[in-house]
Amino acid sequence: MQTIGERLEEARKRKGISIREAAESTKIRSDYLQKFEANTFDAGLPPLYVRGFLRSYARFLDLDPDRIVSDFDSSAGREGKPARRENREGYGRVDFNESARATDGGEPAANGGRSAQDQAVMLKFALLGGGALVAVIIIILLFKVLFGGTPAKPATTASGPAPTVQAEAAQTLTLTAIDATRVKVVQDLDGTILFNGSLARAETKSFKKQGKLLITVEAGKNLRMEVNGRNYPVPLDGYGRFALD
């Protein structure tokens, strides 16, 4: 009578595929498949995983998976080996038809083999944590609504086009030399030099003034200023510079 390994090897060769190709198709490590075909099932795996791997491999090779698993259980019983303590490490694609729920395609659960009870407990704690977080957010929002006060409304602007600023009307500046002096007049608005020169005694110069003027005078006591006929005193006697608004 053929052993389990001989049947597995014969079926694989009948399909004309290698161990590597079988491992890629079944998602079972190739060294496990080699040990199964050599009738070596003590590969450091829990019996549950060995059964799952054998079932998947037999199904892939078009063998009766129930017969293969039954023969494995019989041989393990004859050897009298104690059942290994199962751990939660994932070993590959396994059919857990016997004591665990299988995922699609026979793969073990992505959480590394957690039991249904563990998953239920984790889901319960996740739901409780999410509910607590939502409750805290709702309390914070209610606190802000009840005690935060009414936010100040932004100031509204009048409808219609923006108001325009009327330009200051041009004024006339008249400079009269009481005695000979030198004067420089600069319009601060754009830096335009309105006058830069000497004034003889009793000589008069007039300029259109708009905005502030910067006036430099050689002898302030020798200069008299008028804006639209109104007298403006010169704020210095000697050489200096001053502003006229």
Image: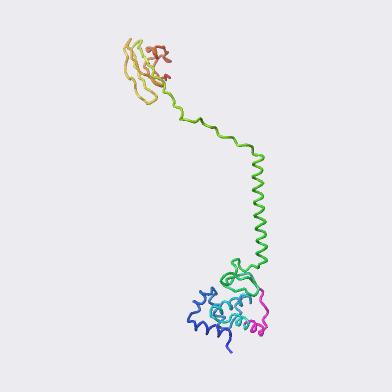
> Observer-nearest residue: 118 or 189?
118
- Indicate whether 14 appears above or below 205: below
Could you tell me residue 225's position as x and y percent?
Answer: 39, 13
- Indicate whether 85 appears above or below 199: below
Could you tell me residue 113's position as x and y percent?
Answer: 62, 69
79 drawn magenta: yes
x 43%, y 23%: residue: 166
Q: Quadrant of residue 70?
A: bottom right
> Observer-nearest residue: 212 or 67?
67
**Total number of numbered discs in the rendering:** 0
Residue lying farthest to the front in this orientation: 160
- Indicate whether 189 appears above or below 202: below
The quadrant in which the C terminus is found is: top left
> Observer-nearest residue: 205 or 78?
78
Left or right of 232, for residue 66: right
Could you tell me residue 218's position as x and y percent?
Answer: 36, 17
Left or right of 14, for residue 98: right
- Indicate whether 179 appears above or below 141: above
Could you tell me residue 105's position as x and y percent?
Answer: 56, 71
Q: Quadrant of residue 150?
A: top right
Describe the colour scheme in one phrase: rainbow
The quadrant in which the N terminus is found is: bottom right
40 drawn magenta: no
In the image, the segment drawn in magenta is 72-86
